Image: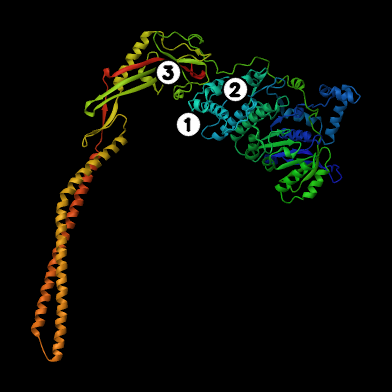
């Protein structure tokens, strides 16, 4: 990347060292700020940056609120007095006590010597002139080259799905700037005016359609869509209030001279920055003649379009384009949010990745938003007007790089003279003080519109009344289209398509066009009858046949769902009608069309319904297979529940009997166990008695034997009771298992029945079909689709 030759370093005494100060052009991708009071040489330094960019083959986009940067076009390769003569101010010559011719001669000599002092000559100026073009654009004026700002808003060549954010940013910028012209400070989120205009422009651009101001005003009154968000348009933004907005914008358009805003060079970034041969251009957008609101509008639109173009480019580390704004006061303030602020901040934050540098100039740093300051990698600081300005700069630089000696920096800024600047580059080792080189362009001061007119006379297109900003005319067939509607057979309904119809895109309607082509709309009623299913169902079929076919082809319709709002009873103002392709003046055409439609629908119309033989069910006409299958499952579940209830009733008595046996067996087991326990206690007492008797010399063997027999008998009764209880429980378990098997079988059976679904096609007889509507609909067509 080439270096920019900005001037030369100066020593502590303020004298040139004789060296050249070179600045790496790639450093401007991190953007820059030039700060200096009036008379500090700030404009001259900005001019030198632009000259160096153009000499390096880098195009520049210059936003010129004061008119100083028009001097970039005053380039005189031969440096002759007669070159300077037309641009000498007679008042200045008079004040100096000399003639205009003598002042021109001395100025030419001074310029030659000034360039020579920096090693430059007329040869360098000639090379500069040959290598780059300078054009002064004057939006809203024919003084320079007019710039078409609002005449035709062509959709950018970007993909909506991929570049939605970029496109919406540009739309937001246009809406904000336009509303600013009529005194509305619109928030993009809460302003109904902003939301409506943004949606209208997006509606057109998504369809690849250019939008002009005439159409925009018409759409504001009658939007080409029915809803904004979840609300109807008329509920969100009532028609009376939309009319007031349209009237305010119309007042703007009707103002004398506003037509110039809609003529001239299109706002196309590549065309502004490069000529046909690929030479870089300096596109100077002159703004000095505009009001503050108009300046905001132009800057917003130009930078928004630049951002859109920028985001379509591949990334680069080198400087691809330099954008310069001379005197940024009011465009990016610290607190307020004028329309131009967002695109400026967007460039400062995002442009680096695309090689687009931005250089801002201002008289004092208080004019700049702190976000802008934090994104600037290069600062050129000249003489400042107040201590507060100096303090703001020192604080900003100290914040950006912690190794700054604040006191030394403040002292160096205080000592700056005219055309002396402190260059702070975040990529350089330390700040440097330098003086600017001599500018190749003649720094004459702001040019008047008359002077710009003279300078750009050979660039301006020949005067001609601006073309109306409407859709291109459509080539006619067999005669010219006109406002008179071609004759239509008597008794035939005739309508014009409302662009807000949801299906307008399906038929290729151009919502911007005023040229209309005839189509046929039809509504057919079909009666489906299936007695087995208890079906008696009427179904409507609606279609558009476009263009009106000859001969009429009933199979060629585009199926739509139209309602009364879609078809207007009267023609829009300014409508032009193409001669129809079909003989619509003949009643026989419509009779044949009715007959063909009815035959076609009777032959092809089918209604698919579903049947479940096992359950004896039929689907309803509005019930799809999934819904019908779900209903079959519910019915099958209900019938399975009924079968299971009967099954459980049958098993219930058997289960109760077994449970009673278990309970009785458990009681007997308990009594037997209690008896056994008693016998065992009695046996223990007998044993104890026997032991005492033995100790006393008495024996009672009979008593012990009887106790043993009683115990054994009690044990047998316990075993029998336990066995009967166990048998009963096993029987209950087997019965419950049998019940579970039966339940599973019933469940599987009804589940299978629920899935037994078959499709049944219900056809039509000729008498089942009736054409209830058949008429002509005029549809707006784009130029490329007619002919």
Residue at screen point 27% across, 32% down: 619
Horizontal and vertical percent for residue 690? 13, 85
Quarter of the figure with residue 41: top right
Upstream in the sequence, badge 2 or badge 3? 2
**Residue that badge 1 annotates:** 230
Q: Which residue is nearer to you in this view: 63 or 389?
A: 389
Residue 787 appears in view:
no
Q: Which residue is nearer to you in this view: 488 or 722?
A: 722
Horizontal and vertical percent for residue 500? 48, 23
The dot on residue 546 is: 3
Q: Which residue is nearer to you in this view: 99 or 183?
A: 183
Within 10 Å of the Cα at label 1, are there few (<14), some (14-19), or many (20+) other Cα atoms? few
**Residue that badge 2 annotates:** 152
Residue 654 appears in view:
yes
720, above or below 19, in the image: below
516, above or below 109, in the image: above
Tell whether label 3 touches label 1 (CB within 8 Å): no
Residue at screen point 40% across, 24% down: 561
Quarter of the figure with residue 192: top right
Upstream in the sequence, badge 1 or badge 3? 1
Locate residue 340 relative to residue 486 in the image: left or right: right
Q: Regarding mark 3 in the picture, which secondary structure is present there?
A: loop
Locate residue 782 relative to residue 610 in the image: left or right: right
């Amino acid at each position: 990347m080439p270096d920019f030759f900005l001037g030369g370093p100066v020593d502590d005494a303020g004298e040139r060292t004789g060296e050249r100060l070179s600045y790496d052009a790639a450093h401007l991708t991190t953007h820059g700020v030039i700060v200096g009071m009036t008379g500090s040489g700030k404009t001259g330094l900005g001019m030198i940056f632009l000259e160096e960019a153009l000499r390096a083959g880098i195009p520049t986009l210059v936003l010129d609120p004061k008119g100083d940067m028009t001097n970039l076009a005053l380039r005189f390769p031969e440096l002759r007095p007669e070159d300077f003569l037309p641009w000498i101010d007679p008042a200045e010559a008079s004040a100096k006590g000399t003639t205009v011719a003598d002042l021109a001669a001395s100025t030419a000599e001074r310029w030659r010597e000034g360039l020579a002092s920096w090693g430059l000559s007329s040869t360098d100026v000639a090379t500069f002139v040959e290598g780059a073009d300078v054009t002064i654009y004057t939006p809203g004026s024919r003084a320079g080259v007019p710039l078409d700002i609002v005449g035709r808003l062509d959709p950018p060549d970007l993909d909506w799905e991929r570049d939605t954010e970029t496109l919406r940013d540009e739309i937001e910028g246009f809406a904000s700037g336009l509303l600013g012209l009529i005194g509305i400070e619109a928030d993009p989120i809460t302003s109904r005016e902003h939301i409506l205009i943004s949606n209208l422009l997006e509606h057109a651009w998504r369809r690849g359609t250019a939008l002009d101001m005439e159409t925009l005003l018409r759409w504001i009154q009658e939007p080409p869509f029915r809803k904004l968000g979840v609300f109807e348009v008329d509920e969100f933004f009532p028609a009376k209030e939309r009319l007031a907005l349209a009237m305010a914008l119309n007042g703007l358009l009707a103002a004398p001279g506003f037509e110039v805003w809609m003529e001239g060079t299109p706002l196309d970034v590549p065309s502004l920055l490069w000529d046909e041969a690929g030479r870089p251009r300096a596109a100077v957008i002159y703004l000095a003649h505009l009001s503050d609101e108009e300046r905001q509008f132009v800057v917003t639109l130009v930078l928004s379009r630049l951002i859109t173009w920028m985001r379509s480019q591949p990334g680069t580390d080198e400087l691809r384009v330099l954008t310069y704004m001379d005197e940024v006061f009011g465009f990016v303030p610290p607190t307020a949010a004028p329309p131009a602020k967002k695109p400026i901040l967007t460039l400062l934050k995002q442009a680096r990745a695309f090689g687009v540098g931005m250089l801002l100039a201002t008289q004092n740093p208080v004019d700049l938003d702190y976000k802008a300051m934090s994104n600037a990698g290069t600062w050129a600081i000249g003489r400042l007007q107040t201590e507060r300005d100096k303090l703001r700069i020192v604080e900003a630089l100290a914040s950006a790089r912690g190794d700054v000696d604040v006191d030394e920096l403040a002292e160096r800024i205080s000592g700056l003279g005219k055309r002396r600047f402190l260059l702070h580059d975040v990529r350089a080792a330390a700040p440097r003080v330098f003086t600017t080189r001599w500018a190749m362009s003649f720094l004459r001061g702001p040019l008047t519109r008359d002077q710009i007119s003279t300078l750009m006379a050979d660039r301006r297109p020949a005067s001609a009344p601006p073309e109306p900003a409407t859709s291109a005319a459509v080539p006619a067939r067999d005669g010219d289209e006109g406002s008179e509607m071609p004759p239509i057979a008597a008794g035939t309904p005739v309508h014009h398509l409302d662009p807000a119809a949801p299906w307008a895109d399906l038929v290729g309607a151009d919502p911007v066009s005023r040229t209309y082509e005839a189509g046929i709309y039809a509504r057919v009623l079909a009666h489906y009858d299936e007695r087995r299913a208890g079906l008696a169902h009427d179904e409507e079929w609606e279609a558009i046949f476009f263009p009106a076919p000859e001969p009429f082809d009933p199979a060629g319709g585009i199926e739509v769902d139209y309602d009364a709002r879609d078809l207007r009873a009267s023609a829009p103002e300014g409508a032009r009608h193409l001669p129809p392709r079909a003989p619509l003046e003949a009643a026989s055409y419509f009779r044949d069309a009715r007959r063909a439609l009815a035959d076609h629908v009777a032959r092809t119309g089918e209604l698919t319904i579903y049947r479940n033989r096992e359950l004896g069910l039929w689907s309803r006409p509005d019930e799809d297979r999934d819904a019908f299958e779900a209903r079959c499952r519910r019915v099958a579940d209900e019938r399975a529940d009924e079968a299971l209830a009967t099954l459980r009733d049958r098993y219930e008595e058997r289960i109760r009997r077994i449970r009673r046996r278990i309970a009785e067996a458990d009681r007997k087991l308990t009594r037997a166990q209690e008896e056994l326990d008693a016998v065992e206690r009695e046996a223990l007492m007998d044993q104890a008695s026997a032991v005492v008797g033995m100790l006393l010399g008495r024996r009672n063997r009979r008593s012990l034997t009887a106790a043993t027999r009683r115990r054994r008998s009690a044990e047998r009764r316990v075993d029998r009771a336990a066995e009967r209880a166990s048998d009963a429980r096993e029987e209950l378990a087997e019965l419950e298992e049998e019940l579970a098997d039966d339940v599973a079988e019933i469940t599987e059976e009804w589940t299978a029945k629920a899935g037994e679904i078959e499709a049944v096609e219900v056809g039509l007889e000729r008498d089942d079909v009736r054409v209830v509507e058949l008429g002509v609909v005029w549809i707006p067509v784009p130029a490329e689709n007619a002919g």
